[in-house]
Image: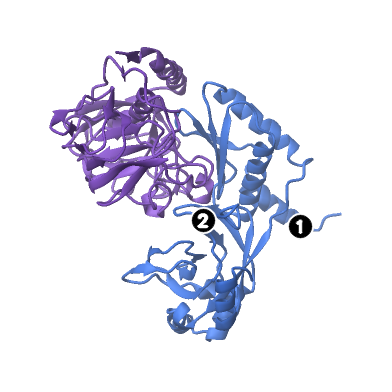
């Protein structure tokens, strides 16, 4: 374990995340974890880490980091035009960094969340089975908060790569996306307006964070006789709740339970698209059956499993 | 032979509690199982018993069971199980419910120093209810509360039932910081803030216990379905527990 970065400036919102804290949602502790599981996974693979190693999740605008130890890093997700001592750093491939260099990230150009993995992973205490930061609960990560200037980030034990690695393609993060969604759990509250929901354009509002994304667009009304709220029930990442004002909110990883009816739920393979959507982006929902959703889930899982095979030495 | 009153009671109960649970799809990896329509002790006891039973008899693909109020949420791996297998398993387990005993709910004693600077709204609650401070403390602490759900913040319990005489509106302007352990009332709800946070509840006291400590095993003192009983303690007893950590 040794120091790898000194934080000169923290960026807009930079936290330490791993796959998530799964066993305590029913105790009021949300799952947390990387919002874009795909980019997070590839970042760790690029530097030879186990898949539960902790990485940085960088949102909108990136930090400036002074390098304190030689290390291999992998940067994936949104392209923030990273530079090291004046040289551009390529994304979706491993890069060896040297002590004394300064890494500078700019603003996200496509997408909005960037992942930075380091060989050995970022070392912070494991709290309730995870290193993920849950800022609102001041839990996990670095003292339960986003990075701030002056922080020293530690790296765990992990060997340097023998050869650099890369993913020979990269996902695109367009500013208009279609999210496949399964109706429910309270689809019976929205029989009349279900068609509006699945045929309208929505826009990501400025209220978009790891708790959820509030959308602007056609208002969805409950059917006559359906109550404004339901008895609170556990939330699942991707649930789309309809509050009394009718503007949909996609619930994300920092939720536990809630009392608004949910019209539909985004399928797991499309969750990363939300993580990379930013205020102003366009969203449409595409209705799928549970059977179709499970088919898509199996294909997606096989694809993600095979990513290791797609990563090449160069 | 049953008395008429008893039959009436049983009939009411069977109407409140679904014999066949209602299933709701919550995306491609979660299934909600509902046991009733409303907030109800009998329904919540069924939810908690089923959650415990499912966790005691896991099957391939079961990732987690999340109980709350009238429903439990089963999180599953679609690669290992399907929706019909899951539903059948729930129904099969439900048949075993009457024959298998689940652990009885625990009652957790939570010491509370009422009033004074630790309960700055006690006088308001007393004035609003027209009860003496002593009566407010007695009514708040005489019966155990059932934990219907935990959520919103780590360890935050949704409790039932507050004595109707203690119902008090929220603060018009929420406090920017409510200290951890504060015990409050908001309309018909009562509860404890496990962590310091902003909040608009009327604060009537504070517990010296750490309800949530991520470094402790287990991090929480209770679970959904347990009972909480508030025990009035003196300010000096509060200070002692705060230092020693145990009542």
Query: Residue A75: percent from the left, percent from the top?
Result: 28, 29
In this picture, is A25 found above or below B127? above
Mark 2: which secondary structure? loop
Decide which of A212, A14 is in the foreground and name it: A14
Decide which of B219, B84 is in the foreground and name it: B219
Q: How many marks?
A: 2
Residue at 61%, 24% (x, y): give it: B85
Residue at 75%, 54% (x, y): give it: B7
Residue with the mark numbered 1: B6
Query: Residue B89: percent from the left, percent from the top?
Result: 65, 29
Residue A257, disc: none
**Mark 1 belongs to which subunit?**
B
Residue at 50%, 57% (x, y): give it: B156
Chain A as rendered: colour: purple
Q: Is residue A223 visible?
A: no
**Mark 2 belongs to which subunit?**
B
Crowd tier of the residue under label 2, counting other residues whose Cα lies within 10 Å: few below 14, some 14–19, many 20 or above: many
Q: Earlier in the sequence, mark 2 or mark 1?
A: 1
Shown in blue, the chain is B
In this picture, is B125 found above or below B195? below
Q: On the picture, is A144 further left or further right than A219?
A: right
Query: Residue A127: percent from the left, percent from the top?
Result: 49, 47
Give the Cα distance between marks 2 and 1. 37 Å
Residue with the mark numbered 2: B155
């Amino acid at each position: 374990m040794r120091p790898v970065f000194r934080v000169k400036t923290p960026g807009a919102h930079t936290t330490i995340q791993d796959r998530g804290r799964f066993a305590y949602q029913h105790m009021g502790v949300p799952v947390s974890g990387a919002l874009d599981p795909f980019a997070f996974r590839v970042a760790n693979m690029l530097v030879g880490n186990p898949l539960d190693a902790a990485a940085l999740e960088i949102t909108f605008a990136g930090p400036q980091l002074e390098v304190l130890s030689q290390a291999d890093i992998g940067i994936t997700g949104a392209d923030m035009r990273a530079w090291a001592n004046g040289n551009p750093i390529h994304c979706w491939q491993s890069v060896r960094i040297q002590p004394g260099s300064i890494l500078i990230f700019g603003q996200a150009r496509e997408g909005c969340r960037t992942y930075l993995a380091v060989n050995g992973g970022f070392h912070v205490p494991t709290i309730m089975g995870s290193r993920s930061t849950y800022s609102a609960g001041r839990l996990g990560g670095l003292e339960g908060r986003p990075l701030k200037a002056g922080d020293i980030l530690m790296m765990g034990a992990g060997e340097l790569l023998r050869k650099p690695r890369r993913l020979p393609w990269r996902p695109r993060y367009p500013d208009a996306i279609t999210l496949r969604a399964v109706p429910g759990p309270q689809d019976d509250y929205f029989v009349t307006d279900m068609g509006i929901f699945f045929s309208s354009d929505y826009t990501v509002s400025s209220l978009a964070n790891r708790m959820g994304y509030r959308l602007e667009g056609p208002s969805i009304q409950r059917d006559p006789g359906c109550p404004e709220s339901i008895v609170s029930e556990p939330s699942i990442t991707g649930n789309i709740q309809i509050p009394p004002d009718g503007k949909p909110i996609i619930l994300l990883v920092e939720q536990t339970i809630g009392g608004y009816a949910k019209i539909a739920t985004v399928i797991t393979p499309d969750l990363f698209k939300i993580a990379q959507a930013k205020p102003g982006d366009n969203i449409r929902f595409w209705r799928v059956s549970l059977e179709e959703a499970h088919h898509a889930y199996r294909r997606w899982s096989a694809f993600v499993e095979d990513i290791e095979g797609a990563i090449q030495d160069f | 032979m049953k008395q008429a009153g008893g039959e009436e009671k049983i009939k009411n109960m069977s109407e409140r509690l679904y014999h066949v649970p209602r299933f709701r799809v919550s995306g491609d990896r979660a299934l909600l199982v509902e046991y009733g329509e409303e907030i109800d002790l009998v329904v919540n006891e069924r939810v908690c018993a089923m959650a415990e039973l499912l966790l005691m008899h896991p099957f391939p693909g079961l990732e987690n069971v999340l109980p709350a109020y009238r429903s439990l949420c089963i999180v599953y791996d679609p690669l290992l199980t399907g929706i019909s297998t899951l539903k059948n398993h729930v129904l099969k387990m439900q048949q075993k419910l009457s024959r298998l005993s689940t652990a009885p709910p625990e009652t957790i004693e939570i010491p509370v120093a009422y009033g004074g600077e630790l309960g700055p709204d006690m006088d308001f609650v007393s004035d609003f209810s027209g009860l003496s401070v002593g009566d407010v403390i007695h009514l708040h602490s005489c019966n155990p509360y059932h934990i219907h759900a935990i959520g919103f913040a780590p360890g935050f319990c949704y409790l039932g039932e507050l004595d109707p005489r203690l119902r008090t509106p929220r603060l018009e302007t929420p406090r920017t910081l409510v200290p951890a352990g504060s015990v409050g009332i908001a309309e018909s709800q009562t509860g404890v803030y496990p962590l310091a946070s902003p909040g608009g509840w009327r604060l009537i006291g504070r517990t010296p216990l750490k309800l949530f400590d991520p470094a402790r095993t287990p991090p929480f003192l209770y679970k959904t379905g347990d009972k909480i009983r508030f025990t009035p303690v003196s300010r000096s007893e509060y200070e002692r527990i705060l230092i020693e950590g145990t009542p």
